[in-house]
Image (spheres, rainbow, N blue to C red):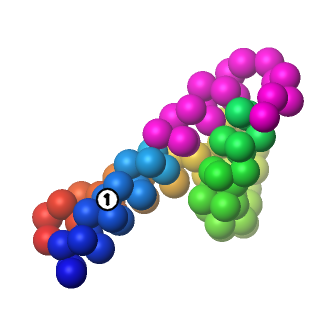
Amino acid sequence: MTEIVRRAALLLLDFLSILLLVRAVLSWLPRRGSRFESVIYTLTEPVLMPFRQLLSRFRFARVFPLDLSFLAAVITIQLLTSLLLRY
């Protein structure tokens, strides 16, 4: 049973990584308001929001030209994936 949970968590983390990558690509394109964009933003915003709220407490994160919450989320997902693969 533990192995099933571990594999499901790894699958979820991989899925989130792909969604975040798609969101990053979409952020470089003009927004068209398509349903696809809406779904991607709806699925990824709950992942990014806690990081955005945490980082907003720091001045450097507010003035930095890139969205550091995205970077923090990707690093966290990679760390969690590494931990799950190790144990």
Left or right: residue 10 versus residue 34 is left
Residue 70 place in picture, x, y as percent:
58, 46
Q: Is residue 63 left or right of residue 40?
A: right
Question: Which residue carries the number 1 mark?
Answer: 10
Q: Is residue 46 left or right of residue 84?
A: right
* Residue 65 higher or lower than 25, as above or below: below
Q: Is residue 55 visible?
A: no
Q: Position of residue 79 (x, y in %)?
A: 32, 59
Which residue is nearer to you in this view: 35 or 68? 35
Q: Residues within 10 Å of mark 1 (few under 14, many from 20)?
A: some
The residue tagged with tag 1: helix, strand or loop? Answer: helix
Q: Which residue does the image show at 80% across and 18% down from the upper left? A: 30
Which range of residues does the magenta coloring cover?
18-35
Image coords of residue 59 (percent x, y): 73, 56
Residue located at (33% from left, 64% from top): 8
Instruction: Decide which of 62, 85 is in the foreground and name it.
Output: 85
Type of amino acid under label 1: Leu
Residue farthest to the top? Answer: 30
Instruction: Residue 11: say if magenta.
Output: no
As rendered, which of 39 and 21 lies closer to the eye?
A: 39
Of the 4 image quadrants, the one containing the N terminus is: bottom left
Residue 33, image x, y percentages: 85, 30
Q: Residue shown at 44%/48% (left/top)? A: 15
The question of residue 28 being in magenta is answered with yes
Locate the C terminus and report the quarter of the image it occupies. bottom left
Tell me where residue 35 sits by quadrant.
Answer: top right
On the picture, is 53 further left or further right than 10? right
Asked if 74 appears above or below 86 in the picture, the reply is above
